[in-house]
Image: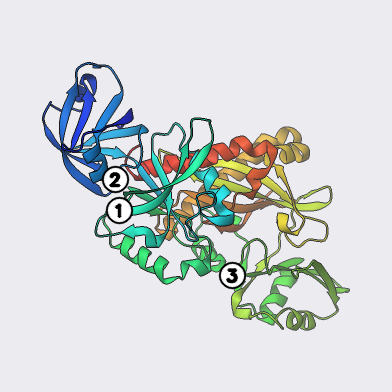
Amino acid sequence: MESIRVRLRFLSYPHVAGIVLPLYLCNKLQLRSRQKITLTLGKREVVATVYQDRRNPDSNVVKITSLLKSQLSIPHGGLIQLKREGETLRIGPSIGIVTTGLRNNYRQPIGGRTSFFHNLLQAQEGKGVFYFIFAPGDVDWSEKRVEAWFLRPTKHGSYVWRKMVTALPDVIYDRIPSRSAEKHDTVQEFKHRLANYSNLPMFNQGFFNKWGVHQLLYPNPEVNEHIPETYTSPSLKTVRNLLRKYRIVYLKPKNGSLGYGIVKIVHAPGKGFDVSYHNGSGNVKRHFQKLDSLYYHIFRGRRVSNYLAQQGIDLTTYHNRPFDFRVHLHKNQQNEWVVSCMAAKVAGTGSVTTHVRTGGTVIPGDELLAHLFGKQKIVMKERIGQAAIRLATAIEQAKGIDLGELGLDMGIDTHGHVWMFEANSKPGRSIFKHARLKQADYESRGLIVDYSCYLANFA
């Protein structure tokens, strides 16, 4: 049976666990007056009595007694969904975002990341869901409850943070912020307990490792045409062999992010080698006559085992500056991959990467493709989008985990071929700060809720 959107209100009635439904809903849900039925919210369940609201037979308002509200840990009223599954009536869906760094501060409960989560939770508007954030240590496993932060609208059109106890949710979205946070005992214990918990899906678990993703995709004939030649723990011989085949070679940290630690090597035959990287204070460029001198300079303060060597791609340029695309993908409510945003990142002057942090510029993908390809813009956009969806599908199948969103860094070479350089399971949202990508931002946040509804079986 499909879910039904209703307006939930509460009755001050502390003696009976009851739910009051208008007559048309009783008929639609095949419920009789005074019938006992199991009501659930997330992982909590209570046996309640059904009552008919005969005064308002066609209303979409459902009333729940204060006792039942307390027993189920229903956090708030408003637009929500009902779904009959056998002898159970589900209220929900309940969607929890797990993260770390929460604190008792009603203005900034997640410190500097508060605005990030504020924007995410705003996507609940009109969706009919319970949506909240919580930390791994906030779960009471024996009671199937969680202490959580909700973003609630005020009468004046603004929002406020409220801390409430609610049921352990139907589905969890993993936004643990870093690899180091992932290693904390509370996070590890939470994920271990969750792995042994039946029917509580968590999507986008953990972080990707560049070499791990390469190993998954390179042998796959469906997508390997988009994957650059890559080697782990590159020896001097490996780098030399790559430079014989390709004019440009990149050295990349296996677990890096935001472009940190990336080294670009350009071979100028007969003249030597140019190396560029970002050292924290600025972009550095040096020239070496011999590759072995360059190699030992690079790995003087870096561990070879932490690095990959990768075929450099001769990227198409925009005003003589290389660019790539951040392609943001989501699963929708039908469990299908869709592209929510394609933004071009143009490298800063002298920068090794296209990251904004090192001087890069964000341009809506449509605008850049129109500038470079004119009428062929639609063809190029489809080519990138179709490759991104094939890659996302291949990653999800190979990883064997639920993925609701991915950020792929992709590029077009001077021959028009599409390449993928990196896949992110916790993609940042800095591209959405661009004024002309606000609609894409809105759609992207909404798709996270839609996929959560699918996993919660409220689609």
- Of 448 and 103, nearer the camera is 103
Q: Amino acid at mark 2?
A: Ser
**Where, by quadrant of the figure, is residue 39 drawn?**
top left
Question: How much space separates mark 2 and mark 3, taking CA atoms?
Answer: 43 Å
Mark 2 or 3: the one toward you: 2
Image quadrant containing the C terminus:
top left
The image's mark for residue 262 is none
Q: Position of residue 156 (x, y in %)?
A: 53, 30
Q: Residue at x 73, y 32 (%)?
A: 375
Q: Residue at x 24, y 59 (%)?
A: 142
- At label 1, counting other C-alpha atoms closer than 10 Å, the crowd grade (few under 14, some 14-19, many 20 or more) is many
The image's mark for residue 73 is 2
Q: Amino acid at mark 1?
A: Arg
Which of pointers 1 and 3 lies earlier in the amino acid sequence?
Answer: 1
Q: Are marks 2 and 3 in contact (CB under 8 Å)?
A: no
Q: Are marks 1 and 2 in contact (CB under 8 Å)?
A: yes
In the rendered view, does 371 fall on the left or right side of 131? right
Q: Position of residue 144 (x, y in %)?
A: 27, 54
Q: Which residue is mark 3?
A: 254
Q: Position of residue 381 (x, y in %)?
A: 64, 40
Image quadrant containing the N terminus:
top left
In the rendered view, does 87 fall on the left or right side of 64? left
Question: How much space separates mark 1 and mark 2, taking CA atoms?
Answer: 8 Å
Q: Residue at x 30, y 59 (%)?
A: 140
Which of pointers 1 and 2 lies earlier in the amino acid sequence?
Answer: 2
**Where, by quadrant of the figure, is residue 28 drawn?**
top left
For mark 3, give the secondary structure: loop
Residue 201 in view of the camera: no
Q: Which residue is mark 1?
A: 145
